C-alpha cells in the first residue's frame, strides 16, 4: 500500500516509528534518497518505461529505414513502369564504365577492387517499336547520361544513391551509342555503351 506524504519530515517520522519494517529494499531506498516520496518513486518508474519505449522506437526506425527505402525502390517506384516496357538497369562507375545491373556500395570502393579491371561497355538489344526504360544509378560519383539519337540528354546528373528512370520508344533501327555526359573521372571518355535496335 502506498501512502502519499508531501513532507519529508513526516516521512522520516513515519520511518522512525516503524522500526519493524523488514523490507531491506525500502530501507535502502530511504537511506539513499530520504526526500523522495512514494509518489515520486512511481513517476520515476514511469519515466524509465517511457525512456525504454522511445529507445525501442528510435532503434526500430533507424533499423527499418533502409529496408523501407529498398522496398519503395523495388516495389512502389517500379509500378510507374508500364508492364510492356523493356527495363534495363545501368549503374555508372567512374573506374569501370556502365555496369549492367545494380552495383552494391562496396563495389565502388577502389581498395576492395582488383586493380586493372577492364572498362565495361554494355550492349543492349531491343526490337524496333519496343518501349525501353533505363533505370540509371551511380555507385560512386555524379554521372550523366546521353542517348542523342533518341533525344535523351540528362542535365541534372545521376546522384549516388538515387535512381533516375529514362523511357523512350525505340522507333528507329540501328546501332546507337549512349554515354556519360558529366565529367566523372579519368576514364570518363570510355564510359559508353551500345543500344542495338533490330527491325
Image: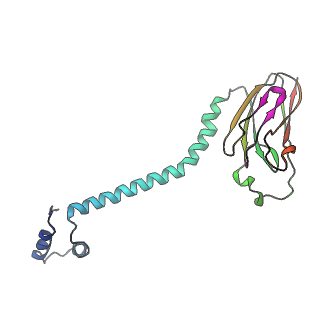
Instruction: Establish if 160 lies above or below 171.
Output: below
Q: Pick out the residue farthest to the left.
A: 17
Task: Please provide percent x and percent y for residue 114.
Answer: 82, 59
Instruction: Establish if 54 lies above or below 169.
Output: below
Q: Quadrant of the C terminus?
A: top right
Q: Residue at x 84, y 59 (%)?
A: 115
Query: How many numbered badges does the structure rendering display?
Result: 0
Instruction: Establish if 45 lies above or below 145.
Output: below
Q: Which stretch did the figure color magenta?
A: 139-154
Q: Can residue 27 be found in the magenta stretch?
A: no
Q: Can residue 142 be found in the magenta stretch?
A: yes
Quadrant for residue 159, please give it: top right
Q: Residue at x 77, y 61 (%)?
A: 111
Q: Is residue 173 left or right of residue 133?
A: right
Quadrant for residue 130, please give it: top right
Q: Pick out the residue farthest to the bottom.
A: 19
Instruction: Establish if 21 lies above or below 143.
Output: below
Task: Please provide percent x and percent y for residue 63.
Answer: 53, 52
Task: Please provide percent x and percent y for residue 175.
Answer: 90, 30
Q: In the depicted view, which residue is nearer to us: 180 or 166? A: 180
Q: Is residue 129 left or right of residue 20?
A: right
Quadrant for residue 99, please give it: top right
Task: Please provide percent x and percent y for residue 117.
Answer: 85, 54
Colouring convention used in this rendered image of the protein: rainbow
Q: In the depicted view, which residue is nearer to us: 191 or 61? A: 191
Q: Quadrant of the N terminus?
A: bottom left
Q: Pick out the residue farthest to the right.
A: 174
Amino acid at each position: 500500500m502506498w501512502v502519499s506524504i508531501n513532507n519529508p519530515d513526516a516521512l522520516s517520522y513515519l520511518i522512525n516509528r516503524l522500526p519493524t519494517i523488514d523490507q531491506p529494499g525500502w530501507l535502502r531506498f530511504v537511506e539513499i534518497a530520504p526526500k523522495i516520496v512514494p509518489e515520486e518513486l512511481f513517476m520515476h518508474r514511469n519515466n524509465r518505461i517511457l525512456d525504454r519505449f522511445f529507445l525501442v522506437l528510435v532503434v526500430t526506425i533507424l533499423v527499418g529505414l533502409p529496408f523501407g527505402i529498398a522496398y519503395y525502390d523495388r516495389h512502389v517506384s517500379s509500378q510507374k513502369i508500364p508492364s510492356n516496357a523493356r527495363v534495363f538497369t545501368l549503374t555508372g562507375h567512374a573506374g569501370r564504365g556502365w555496369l549492367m545491373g545494380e552495383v552494391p556500395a562496396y563495389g565502388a570502393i577502389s581498395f576492395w577492387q582488383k586493380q586493372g579491371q577492364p572498362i565495361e561497355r554494355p550492349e543492349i538489344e531491343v526490337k524496333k517499336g519496343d518501349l525501353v526504360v533505363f533505370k540509371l544509378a551511380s555507385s560512386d560519383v555524379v554521372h550523366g547520361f546521353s542517348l542523342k539519337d533518341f533525344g535523351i540528354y540528362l542535365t541534372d546528373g545521376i546522384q549516388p544513391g538515387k535512381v533516375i528512370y529514362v523511357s523512350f520508344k525505340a522507333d528507329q533501327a540501328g546501332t546507337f551509342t549512349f554515354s556519360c555526359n558529366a565529367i566523372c573521372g579519368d576514364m570518363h571518355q570510355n564510359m559508353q555503351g551500345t543500344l542495338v535496335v533490330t527491325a
